[in-house]
Amino acid sequence: MTLDLLRFTTAGSVDDGKSTLIGRLLYDCKQVFDDQLQHVAEASVRRGGAGSLDLALLTDGLRAEREQGITIDVAYRYFATSAHDGTPGRRFIIADCPGHQQYTRNMVTGASNADLSVILIDARRGVLEQSKRHAFISSLLGIPHMVIAVNKMDLVDYSQDRFDEIVADFAGFAAKLHFASDLTYVPISALDGDNVVKQSARMSWYEGPTLLQLLETVEVAFDHPFDVPARFPVQWVIRPDGASGAADYRGYAGQIASGALRVGEEITVLPAGQRTRIAAIDTYDGALETAVAPMSVTLRLQDELDVSRGELICPADDPPRIAKELEADICWMTDTPLHEGGRCLLKHTTRTASAIVERLLDVIDVHTLQRSSSPQQLRLNDIGRVSLRMSTPLAIDPYRENRRTGSFILIDEATNGTVAAGMICAPDS
């Protein structure tokens, strides 16, 4: 049986122990090769470890990061756990996000596809600005699950009172956020491994699951693909040449963004609105009767329609909204401020359009979550709501309903660099 996949991110304020936590997960799950371990041991000695193993070095790969002892880029790691106690294991992709405020845009990038967010809080320092910022961004990105890992409990004598104090402090802030599911708190020591993979004997007052137990049992977003409408952005039109012997073949290839598609189902192609039915679903391993997200497939249609890259195939009775104007919350990711009238490219699924910023509607204070209306500009790492007008209509869903068709990026036309990540708002929200 193929194990399912959980994508999760770790975030928090600088030096809260994110990289050490991931190193501990990899080490205690026996996912570190002997040569990696030897290299980390040697690097730990060079940094003055005097025999102790600095597990953070398993993820802090850039030289600048190792010299400064911080995470700058988003570090991705992969591991899997085996079946135990009758519970199947799981595959994981971890995004270790930077804690410094100037790298918040990297956090947005790392968390954009996550199913779960682990926010670390230093038990000595409590809830800080970046803890709130990353929790808010996780909420804004619609990450379905959040775990608050109160780290460095060994430095506060494993105090239950201190843990409860932090839980109460963060709960007051979290009450203002919009979570798709419950919020879980776990007291840990990433350095010593308490409540990370194994239950801690030094915190017997905590009766909840370890962090790994939560990661292995949390529900993955694609567990119920039939609960959301199907969305299929066309990535490529397949038309073999006559020499291949399949001159009449016309297929539309791409990845199912959400939901499920079935042979014989009536569909519409947007934005043109043409209707037909699915004649066949082809894959490398053969034809299917039903395909679900996030599978990559090729659709064949009953009628010969003019379909090209960037168009969207969806159920005829449950289409997204077609719009040339939208409102969205964006995270601004570049040093050059955003002003009204700014022009850029908007990349939405497989479609790209020119866009103009008609209005800056507000900017969010991450401390209070209050929105200040009509800002003059959005600066680096600011999160605010904007009104955009596109050169061509797009098939869009509100981000709260569909993360794939409700998100986009903005691209600088001159440099081709990504300048913002956007989440589409529901009309009149």
Image (tube, grey):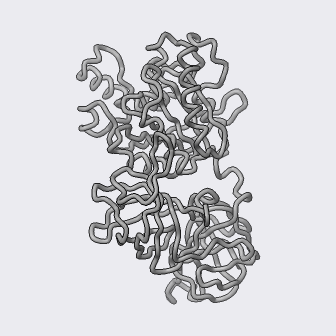
x and y percentages locating residue 423 in the rendered image? 52, 59
Looking at the rendered image, the quarter that the N terminus falls into is top right
Looking at the rendered image, the quarter that the C terminus falls into is bottom right
Q: Is residue 209 left or right of residue 265?
A: left
Q: Is residue 203 left or right of residue 41?
A: right
Q: Quadrant of residue 233?
A: bottom right
In percent of the image, x 25 and y 18: which residue is there? 48
x and y percentages locating residue 124 in the rendered image? 43, 19
144 or 55: which is nearer to us?
Answer: 144
Q: How many marks?
A: 0
Determine whether 426 is above or below 316 in the image.
Answer: above
Determine whether 214 is above or below 72 in the image.
Answer: above
| Residue sitting farthest toward the front | 373
Determine whether 357 is above or below 126 in the image.
Answer: below
In percent of the image, x 68 and y 88: which residue is there? 303
x and y percentages locating residue 38 in the rendered image? 33, 25
In percent of the image, x 64 and y 79: which residue is there? 300
Q: Quadrant of residue 248?
A: bottom right
Q: Is residue 226 left or right of residue 342?
A: right
In percent of the image, x 59 and y 28: which residue is there? 185
x and y percentages locating residue 108 in the rendered image? 44, 49
Determine whether 193 is above or below 274 in the image.
Answer: above
